[in-house]
Amino acid sequence: MTQEILRAEGLRKSFPGVQALDGVDLTLRPGEVHVLLGENGAGKSTLIKMLSGAHHPDEGRVLLDGQPVDIRDARTAQRLGIATIYQEFNLVPQLTVAENLALGRPPRRFGFVDTRAMRRQAAELLARVGVDVDPATPIAGLGIARMQMVEIAKALALNARILIMDEPTAVLTTGEVDRLFAIVRQLRDAGVAVVFITHHLEEIAEIGDRVTVLRDGRSVAEVAADTPQNELIRLMVGRPIDQQFPRRPAEVGEALLTVRGLSRRGAFDDVSFEVRAGEVVGVAGLVGAGRTEVARAVFGADRYDSGQVSVRGETLARADVHAAMRAGLGLVPEDRKGQGLVLGDDVAANLGLVTLRRATRAGFVDLRAQRRAAAKVAEQLAIRMTGLDQEVRTLSGGNQQKVVIGKWLVAEAGVLILDEPTRGIDVGAKVEIYQLINALTDSGRAVLMISSDLPEILGMSDRILVMARGRLVGELPAAQATQDAVMELAVTDVEASRVQ
C-alpha cells in the first residue's frame, strides 16, 4: 500500500449551536484523487478549512508524513505544501489577473516588483489551464467561469504536495471540465495528493480513486470511486432517492413573461421568447453565450439598447428593478453570496429583503408581519437553521440558496428567473429545489431556468432555449432534447449562419 502523506484522526469542531465535525477521519496518499462527498452541511467545508489553516480543531489531530502538525493559518498550510481552491473565490477584484496570481510573492528586481516578469509568469500559468485572458485584465472584469480558472492557476503556482479543490467544476463548461481533469491527472501522475469535492456524481468515477463520505459531521464510509451512484447517494443522505430530476409538468396557461428583440451591443442581439404560466423554460449555452446578461436585462438590473420586456402584457420600463419586482418578476442570481444575500444579516432579514418597502408604513417596518411571513416560508422550504436569528453566512450552501429563493416566495413573485440554481448544492438539496420548482409551476407561476448542468436542463425543463454568442439559436421541446442536440446548437457559428 502506498504510504500516506496525510492522516486526520478524530477531528471535532463545533460552532455556536452547531456540531460541524464529530470525529472525522481522513487519509490521503500521494498520487491519488480522493473525493470528499456529502450533503451541504455534512462538514466538508469545515474539514478542508482545518487542513488549510482557516479553522483549528477542538479535538483530534493531523499528521503529515507521519508527524503531528499544527496548521494554525493559511501561511502554515502553504509552507507545509497544502494549497486550497475554495468554492467561494479568494481573489481581489480590484487587482489584475497577474497581480492576483502573484499575490504575496511577486517577482522582484532591484527591490521593486518586476511587472514584466509577473505578467510573463501569469501568462504561462493561464496557458497551463487553457484560459485566453490578458494578465493585465482586472479580476472584476471576468465572468465566474474564468475566475474559477484563475483560482486553479493560482493554486498551481504554489507547486503544492496536497491540492484541495472545492467544487472546481461547478461553473465550468464541458470543455473546461475536460481541461481541468487533464490537469488533475497530470498532478496525480506527478505524485500530488488531490482532495476533490464535487456534487456532480458522474465526475467521481471519471476522476477519483477513493471516496470518503461525510454525513452529519461524521465520516460514514470510505469506498472506491467506481461505487454505483445510487449507493453513493444512499451513503450521503441516509436514504435512497428514487428520482434525481422529479419534473412534474403542470397545466400551461397564458404568457406571463414576453421578451421581444432584446439587444445590447457586445452582449446579446435580437433575443425573443416567452414563458407561460405552469412551465419551466430552460436556457442552455456555453459560458459567454449571454444567458446571464439577458436574464439581468430582463429583470432590469442591467440596461439594454433595444427591445421590449412585458409581464402579463404590461411593458416594463428599461433598467428598472423596482418596476420588474412590482410586476411580479424575481431573480435568483448565479452568485448567491455576492448578489443574492446580505451575509451579515440573519435569515429573517434576508427573507424579508424584497418585501421591506411594501411592509413599511409611515417610515416604520412591520417587523412582526415580516417575521411571520419569513417563518412560514422557512418552514415550507425546510431551511435547516437554529432559528430565524441565525446569520445567513453560517448556513450551508443549499440552505443559503433556499433563502435566496424564499425571499421571492415571500414576495409572491409570479415569474422566477433562476440563474444556476443548484450550483454547489448536493444531490439531496437539489431534489428539494426541484420539488419547489414543481410547486411553483403547479400554482400557476412560471420559471426561467439558466443552467450549465445539461442533465439538469434536460431533466427539469418543459422547453429548452439555446444561446450562442449572444443570440438565441434554437428551441427544443423536452421530448426531443438530448445532450447532443443541445450542444450542437450551443456551438453554432452565429457569424457563419448570418452569412448563409
Image: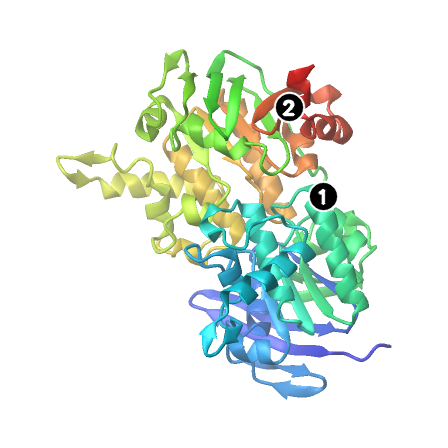
The residue lying at 56 percent from left, 56 percent from top is 87
Residue 137 vs residue 226: left or right?
A: left
Residue 224 vs residue 381: left or right?
A: right
Marks counted in the figure total 2
The residue type indicated by label 1 comes to: Gly
Q: Residue furthest front?
A: 110
**Where is residue 412 shown, x and y percent of the image?**
39, 28
Q: Residues within 10 Å of mark 1 (few under 14, many from 20)?
A: few
In the image, which disc is placed on residue 175? 1
**Where is residue 228 shown, x and y percent of the image?**
82, 50
Q: Nearer the viewer, residue 313 or 171?
A: 171
In the image, which disc is placed on residue 495? 2
- Quadrant of the image occupied by residue 111: bottom left
Q: Looking at the image, can residue 462 be seen?
A: no
In the image, which disc is placed on residue 153? none
The residue lying at 63 percent from left, 54 percent from top is 168
